[in-house]
Amino acid sequence: MSSAESNAGSDLRLEIVNMEGVVWSGAVRVVTLPGAEGAFGILRGHTPLLTRLREGFVHVVTPQDERISVYVSGGFVESQPQGVTVLADTAVRSADLDAARADAARQEASSLLHSELAGIDHAQLQAELVQAAAQWSQEIRRSKRS
């Protein structure tokens, strides 16, 4: 019996899913996750846990020593002694990511956001809000008199 076969019962089962289905599933030795309060690792036999995930990478080490990374945009993780389930808002295997395309999309979104925010006249907006509040206040007073 090979060492992989003898250790097969001691592996942790991991499933990473998003709204579209299963992104990755298999046996792992260890999984490291981007928790909302900081990164943490899970091994087989871990105490049951349910917690939130922040944006980041889930790092996996398989029994064959293969290293896999999956980007998640947030979500939840449930850990049981023999298995871990990651419910991600968005999940993409790092092998499927095009770093240059992702960076370009992020920069474009950032510049659009900044240009839209830069075009706001805060003084004008404040004046309009004050005027609307005054009109609303007058309407309330009129309705109370009637």
Image: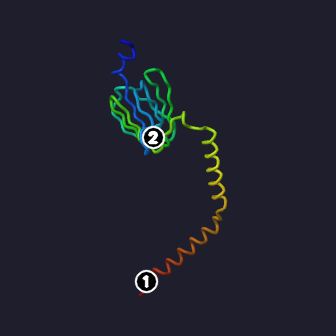
At horizontal 59% and vertical 38% (from top left) the residue drawn is 98
Residue 100 found in image quarter: top right
Mark 2 highlights which residue?
A: 53
Q: 89 or 35: which is nearer to us?
A: 89
Coloration mode: rainbow
Of callouts 1 and 2, which one flags the residue occurring earlier in the amino acid sequence?
2
Q: Quadrant of residue 30?
A: top left
Measured from the top left, where is residue 69 in percent x and y? 51, 32
x and y, in percent, of residue 95 in the image: 54, 33
Q: CA distance from mark 1 to mark 2?
A: 50 Å
CB atoms of marks 1 and 2 within 8 Å: no
Q: Determine the residue positioned at 61% across, 71% down.
A: 127
Tag 2, which secondary structure? Answer: strand
Q: Residues within 10 Å of mark 2 (few under 14, many from 20)?
A: many
**In the image, what residue type sits under mark 1?**
Ser
Identify the disc placed on residue 143.
1
1 vs 2, front mark: 2
In-image side of 102 versus 84 (left or right): right
Image location of residue 77, percent across then percent down:
40, 38
The residue closer to the viewer here, 8 or 45, is 8
The answer to whether residue 25 is above or below residue 104 is above
Q: Quadrant of the C terminus?
A: bottom left
Q: How many callouts does the rendering have?
A: 2
Give the camera-side residue of 39 and 139.
39
Q: Residue at x 46, y 84 (%)?
A: 142
